[in-house]
């Protein structure tokens, strides 16, 4: 009787099909998460860029308007910076946060495009206090900037609140 010796083969360490499938699923989930993060980061960067442009525009107008003593005849279209002539206030314009900003100048808005972002700008003024004896008026000046609907990135900018900046100027009878 012959004894037959059977040698078992040792297989080299390898991955099973289940291990490969689990690794593939984890890789797909990680890639999807990274792409989603990149999309939101790019979107938020564009919103931040638009908000900064609107804030700078409002600050420019406010500083220039203050230099005129808060004149009710102020017109940004005369600056030569690309502001349009006054147009009627669109129905979708929010008129700023709160409502304590006063009356719009000439009941109109101006349009401008900054960094390829079209905006509508409304100027408001309201007399806060008056000292008849000293002939001095404290006037509140406000600038409200909203993003225009004619932009191609409306879906990205539609959730951005308007930019509202306010300051005060002392108007005297002698200086206007």
Image (cartoon, grey):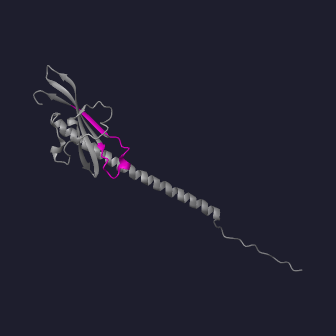
* Looking at the image, residue 99 lies above or below residue 56: above
Residue 102 in the image, given as x and y percentages of width and height: 25, 31
* Residue 148 colored in magenta in the image: yes
Q: Name the one closer to the observer, 5 or 166.
A: 166
Q: Quadrant of residue 173?
A: top left
Q: Residue at x 66, y 70 (%)?
A: 12
The segment highlighted magenta reads 146-168
Residue 105 in the image, given as x and y percentages of width and height: 21, 35
* Looking at the image, residue 141 lies above or below residue 29: above
Q: Quadrant of the N terminus?
A: bottom right
* Looking at the image, residue 27 lies above or below residue 52: below
Going by the image, does 109 lie left or right of 49? Answer: left
Q: Residue at x 17, y 40 (%)?
A: 75
* Residue 87 colored in magenta in the image: no
Residue 68 in the image, given as x and y percentages of width and height: 15, 36
Q: Quadrant of residue 171?
A: top left
Q: Quadrant of residue 99?
A: top left
Q: Residue at x 73, y 73 (%)?
A: 9
Looking at the image, the residue that sits furthest to the right is: 1
Q: Quadrant of the C terminus?
A: top left
């Amino acid at each position: 009787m012959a004894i037959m010796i059977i040698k078992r083969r040792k297989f080299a360490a390898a991955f099973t099909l289940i291990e490969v499938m689990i690794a593939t699923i984890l890789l797909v989930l990680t890639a999807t998460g990274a792409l989603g993060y990149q999309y939101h980061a790019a979107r938020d960067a564009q919103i931040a860029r638009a908000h900064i442009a609107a804030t700078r525009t409002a600050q420019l107008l406010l500083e220039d308007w203050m230099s005129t003593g808060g004149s009710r005849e102020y017109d940004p279209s005369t600056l030569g910076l690309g502001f349009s002539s006054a147009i009627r206030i669109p129905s979708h314009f929010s008129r700023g946060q709160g409502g304590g900003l006063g009356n719009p100048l000439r009941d109109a808005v101006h349009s401008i495009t900054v960094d390829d972002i079209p905006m509508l700008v409304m100027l408001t003024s309201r007399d806060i206090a008056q000292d008849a004896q000293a002939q001095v008026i404290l006037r509140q000046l406000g600038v409200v900037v909203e993003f225009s609907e004619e932009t191609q990135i409306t879906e990205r900018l539609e959730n951005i609140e308007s930019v509202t900046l306010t300051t005060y100027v002392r108007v005297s009878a002698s200086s206007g």
